[in-house]
Amino acid sequence: MVGDEHSDPNLMQFLGATKRNMLGNHFWEYYVNDAPRIVLNKLESCGYRVVSMTGVGQTLVWCLHKE
């Protein structure tokens, strides 16, 4: 998952993300099939930098900042 329904549509298109609504959720999310390293490399080319990273259960979360 790379974004929610309020994410920048141009950035989501650049990442190749598709918008979906999972059964039981009351929100839309953007999803990609790429590995995290591919998505992070694409975001780096747009000026984003990783600030921190953590694991939550079996989920990895990256916090990024754009200069």
Image: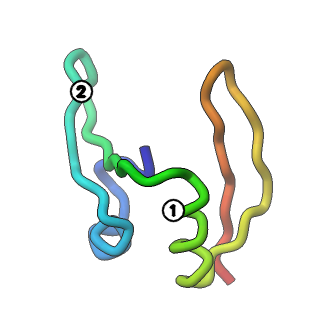
Badge 2 or badge 1: first in the primary sequence: 2
Quarter of the image with the C terminus in it: bottom right
* Residue at figure coordinates x 32%, y 49% from the top left: 30
**Front-most of residues 54 and 16:** 16
Q: Against 4, is 47 above or below?
A: below
Residue at the spot 67% in from the left edge and 69% down from the top edge: 65
Q: Residue at x 51, y 51 (%)?
A: 35
At label 2, the amino acid type is: Met
Front disc: 2 or 1: 1
Callout 1 secondary element: helix
Where, by quadrant of the figure, is residue 43 drawn? bottom right
Q: Position of residue 50 (x, y in %)?
A: 73, 64
Q: Dot 2 corresponds to which residue?
A: 22
Locate residue 57, reporting x and y percent: 67, 19
Determine the residue positioned at 43% across, 54% down: 34
What label does residue 58 carry, if any? Answer: none
Percent across and percent down for residue 39 are 51, 62
Q: Is residue 8 left or right of residue 35?
A: left
Q: CA distance from mark 2 to mark 1?
A: 21 Å
Give the quarter of the figure containing the N terminus.
top left
Image side of residue 21 versus residue 33, left or right: left
Task: Please tell me the numbered disc located at residue 39.
Answer: 1
> Which of 7/62 is in front?
62
Q: Which quadrant of the structure image shows residue 10?
A: bottom left
| Percent coordinates x, y for residue 16 in the rendering | 30, 64
The amino acid on which the numbered mark 1 sits, given as a three-letter code, is: Val
* Left or right: 3 as drawn, with respect to 45: left
Q: Is residue 25 above or below residue 41?
A: above
> Mark 2 and 1 residues: CB-CB less than 8 Å, in contact?
no
